[in-house]
Image (cartoon, helix red, strand yellow):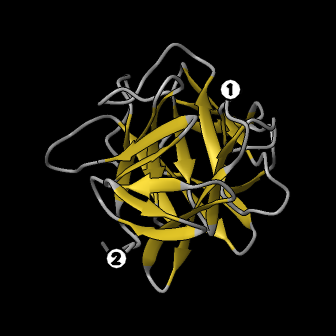
Amino acid sequence: MGARNNEKLMLWVDGVGGYWLCLADAVVLGQPNAEVPADVPILADLSSRHARIRRDGEGYLIEAMHRTRADGRPVGRVAPLADGSVITLGDSVRLRFRRPHALSATARLDFVSLHRTEPGADAVLLMADSCVLGPKPSSHVVCQRWPHELVLYRHDDELYCRSRVAFEVDGVACSGRARIGRNSRITGEHFAVALE
């Protein structure tokens, strides 16, 4: 597939939910607009390019293009984001920025307000090096009924997955790790995950 920096995928986790998986170092948040598309299209009264979240080394910054607040303070141009920061776009869109896993630079955006993305997703994952799906509270996607973790990660501009238990990718048995692509389905005894 080639994990291109501007690519985004939908990650469907059976019994858990759907997630935007953004692979770029910077993503634009805004209203859906065919002419000027946002990376994360939010159904709300926003500009089509309202704000940008950018990974800067191991940290993240929010860049305001229109009225944006971070933890209640107006963002003049750029502000750092910390684990738990609340981002407010316009008057009412509120997102919580999370860095749940201490060993990964991947971040997660959860909706605090009742707004949603188009198409709908439970959260947005800003994938850096790896994305952990599993039963621990520190997982990027918490899957409470899973006995083991499944890790999505980048290697040589490709996406891979790894697990300590046997799994299949697109119906082919795998052990340890395997390359995955757009439209791959990853299944194990206790889990099923699909990319599209």
Disc 1 is placed on an element classified as loop
**Residue 115: x percent and y percent?**
46, 19
- Mark 1 or mark 2: name the one nearer the start of the chain: 2
Residue 161 appears in view: yes
Residue 93: which numbered mark, if any?
none
Amino acid carrying label 1: it is Arg
Disc 2 is placed on an element classified as loop
Spatial CA distance of label 1 from label 2 is 31 Å
Residue closest to the eye, 5 or 33 = 5
**Residue 47: x percent and y percent?**
35, 37
Please tell me in which quadrant of the rendered image residue 6 appears.
bottom left
Nearest to viewer (mark 1 / mark 2):
1
Please tell me in which quadrant of the rendered image residue 8 appears.
bottom left
Please report the residue visible at 46 percent of the width from the left and 66 percent of the height from the top: 24
Amino acid carrying label 2: it is Gly
CB under 8 Å between callouts 1 and 2?
A: no
Residue 145: which numbered mark, if any?
1
Please report the residue visible at 48 percent of the width from the left and 86 percent of the height from the top: 156
- The residue identified by callout 2 is 2
